[in-house]
């Protein structure tokens, strides 16, 4: 048997050396009062202490190394803390200030009210940083109690491992004890899919980010795993609903991103099968202004048919540069909207072929003119979501105008180039205000003006159950409303088309005459079949459009539209 022998003097020496490697400190709140009875733990070790009546603690027998210090306030109204500290000899933290905190209590159950143990609770800052939250797992009664900082945070609860229940999230700012009561998880249904290269050889696309948004509430859904595995597969548990699924390949991946609208989850599991992503190449460039790089500009890419591509990570960097993955072999137009505050005009490139990685080079953008418009209807109500378009009367090309839509107060702050342009102001569909056009408006200096827009005699609007994804020629749900505001019969014609981004209209029905009774409105809800579209139009958002025209002159009185995605 081997034994370790220690003489009296050697033991004293070893003891003093161990004591020399220590961590001490005093825990206080923001008022300088001691925090009593808080637990201090060095993560991954057995070393721990509890703060005394003066808030002080000492941990002996450490090594000269870095430790992760975790502070659990237990019953104190301060927030937990976690930080790294290098111990070198007798190390003193001094007064360590713990920020104000609040105790959150909750009980979690399944959809039938049965308490759930082993529910894991997490807390995140708005930037996504996960905070240290001791004692954050529910007990056998489904109850949990933990501390959070008194700042905006997101609370998250994950059901027990292996459960198909849907995780819970809540954004809060707790300024005192927060009792959430009993929270019942929603039932989740298993959604699966495999992301692969489009074409005859569907090689898996690994590490592809999967982003799911509830189309009815705009809630960003919580996925316990939001990346495809090495085989390109992903699994999610989602409650009953209608979802937008976005697939974003990892940085450096040679694939283009994709959006799938109207993915239904209806009380059963759903297999989305193989989802193909096209091979892609980088389309890049740099934008510079009078003061240097144009930072944070929004860059949009349009294909040869006018479709706006789904392009994540499409803002310019600190250098003014951008690099966006686009399907290989296409011809594209690059549009840039600089931040309005920069005062720099927008830009649209000539068509660029991209068979391989392609750069548009460095583009110099010019200083523009600030234009402020306050738009109102005839009753004085602000026109929200109205847009302004400028068209060059010589080239008949629309000019890119950063900030060309009105906010909740009806105000538009836009940046326009110097020049002469045809101007059109378009209120959003369903508005009582009519569009307003003026040809040949000179823009030579900044100005601000308030404009009341006249009523339109006839209005129409379309709405629906968000954006539906349907088979080519499939049905969409529409809520169609139209109104004759004048005290006389209006003889009109109605036409319904799918207005393609290329400018071509695919008719749904031929023009039909309709006399609108005076001063009356109508509303209809119905499922409509959509006209079949060419294969090149599938997978893109399309506009099902209804137009009302004056029967005699064929002047456009109003139009409305609803988006859908044929697949």
Image (cartoon, rainbow, N blue to C red):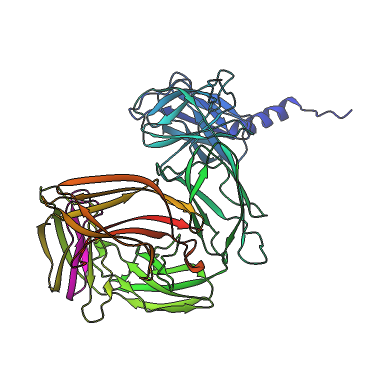
Between 381 and 524, the residue placed more toward the observer is 524
Q: Position of residue 146 (x, y in %)?
A: 48, 26
The structure residue drawn at horizontal position 11% and vertical position 56%, both measured from the top left corner, is: 454
Between 440 and 550, the residue placed more toward the observer is 550
Magenta stretch holds residue 37: no
* Left or right position of 551 against 129: left
Q: Position of residue 276 (x, y in %)?
A: 59, 61
Quadrant of the drawing holding the N terminus: top right
- Does 285 sit above or below residue 111? below
* Left or right position of 337 against 108: left
* Left or right position of 34 against 437: right
The structure residue drawn at horizontal position 38% and vertical position 28%, both measured from the top left corner, is: 29
Query: On the image, which quarter does residue 42 sit in?
Result: top right
- Does 119 sit above or below residue 357? above
Over which residues does the magenta segment extend?
407-435
Q: Position of residue 509 (x, y in %)?
A: 37, 61
Residue reaching furthest bottom? 394
Query: On the image, which quarter does residue 336 sit in?
Result: bottom left
Residue 158 seen in render: yes
The structure residue drawn at horizontal position 25% and vertical position 75%, both measured from the top left corner, is: 366
Between 39 and 26, the residue placed more toward the observer is 39
Magenta stretch holds residue 429: yes
The number of discs equals 0
* Left or right position of 430 against 321: left
Q: Position of residue 180 (x, y in %)?
A: 42, 24
Residue 318 seen in render: no
């Amino acid at each position: 048997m081997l034994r370790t022998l220690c003489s009296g003097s050697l033991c004293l020496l070893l003891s003093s050396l161990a004591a020399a490697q220590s961590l001490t400190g005093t825990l206080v709140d923001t008022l300088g009062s001691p925090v009593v009875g808080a637990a201090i733990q060095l993560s991954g070790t057995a070393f721990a202490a509890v703060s005394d009546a003066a808030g002080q603690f000492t941990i002996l027998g450490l090594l000269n190394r870095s430790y992760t210090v975790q502070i659990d306030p237990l019953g104190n109204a301060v927030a937990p803390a976690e930080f790294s500290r290098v111990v070198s000899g007798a190390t003193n933290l001094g007064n360590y200030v713990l920020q104000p905190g609040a105790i959150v209590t909750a009980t979690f159950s399944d959809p039938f009210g049965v308490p759930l143990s082993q529910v894991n609770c997490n807390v995140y800052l708005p930037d996504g940083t996960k905070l240290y939250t001791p004692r954050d797992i529910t007990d056998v009664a489904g109850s949990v109690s933990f501390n959070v900082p008194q700042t905006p945070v997101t609370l998250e609860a994950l059901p027990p491992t292996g459960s198909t229940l849907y995780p819970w999230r809540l954004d809060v700012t707790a300024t005192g004890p927060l009792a959430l009561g009993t929270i019942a998880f929603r039932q989740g249904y298993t959604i699966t899919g495999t992301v692969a290269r489009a074409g005859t050889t569907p090689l898996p696309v690994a590490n592809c980010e999967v982003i799911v948004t509830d189309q009815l509430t705009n809630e960003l859904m919580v996925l316990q795993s939001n990346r495809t595995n090495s085989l390109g597969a992903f699994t999610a548990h989602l409650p009953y609903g209608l979802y937008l699924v976005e697939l974003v390949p990892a940085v450096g991946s040679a694939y283009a991103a994709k959006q799938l609208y109207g993915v239904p989850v209806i009380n059963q599991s759903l297999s989305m099968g193989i989802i193909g992503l096209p091979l892609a190449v980088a389309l890049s460039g740099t934008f510079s202004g009078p003061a240097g790089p144009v930072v944070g500009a929004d860059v949009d890419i349009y294909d040869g048919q006018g479709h706006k591509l789904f392009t994540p990570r499409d803002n310019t960097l600190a250098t003014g540069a951008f690099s966006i993955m686009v399907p290989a072999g296409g011809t594209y137009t690059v549009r840039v909207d600089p931040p309005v505050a920069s005062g720099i005009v927008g830009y649209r490139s000539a068509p660029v072929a991209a068979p391989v990685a392609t750069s548009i080079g460095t583009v110099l953008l010019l200083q523009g003119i600030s234009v402020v418009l306050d738009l109102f209807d005839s009753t004085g109500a602000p026109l929200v979501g109205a847009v302004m378009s400028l068209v060059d009367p010589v080239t008949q090309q629309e000019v890119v105008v950063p900030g060309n839509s009105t906010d909740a107060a009806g105000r538009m702050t836009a940046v326009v180039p110097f020049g002469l342009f045809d101007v059109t102001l378009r209120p959003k569909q369903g508005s009582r205000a009519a569009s307003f056009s003026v040809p040949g408006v000179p823009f030579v200096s900044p100005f601000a003006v308030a404009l009341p827009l006249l009523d339109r005699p006839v209005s129409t609007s379309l709405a629906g159950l968000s954006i539906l994804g349907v088979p080519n020629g499939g049905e969409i749900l529409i809520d169609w409303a139209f109104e004759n505001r004048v005290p006389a019969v209006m003889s009109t014609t109605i036409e319904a088309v799918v207005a393609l981004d290329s400018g071509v209209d695919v008719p749904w029905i031929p023009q039909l005459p309709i006399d609108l009774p005076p001063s009356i409105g109508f509303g209809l809800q119905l499922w409509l079949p959509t006209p079949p579209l060419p294969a090149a139009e599938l997978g893109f958002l399309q506009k099902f459009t209804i137009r009302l025209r004056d029967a005699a002159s064929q002047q456009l009185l109003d139009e409305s539209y609803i988006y859908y995605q044929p697949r």
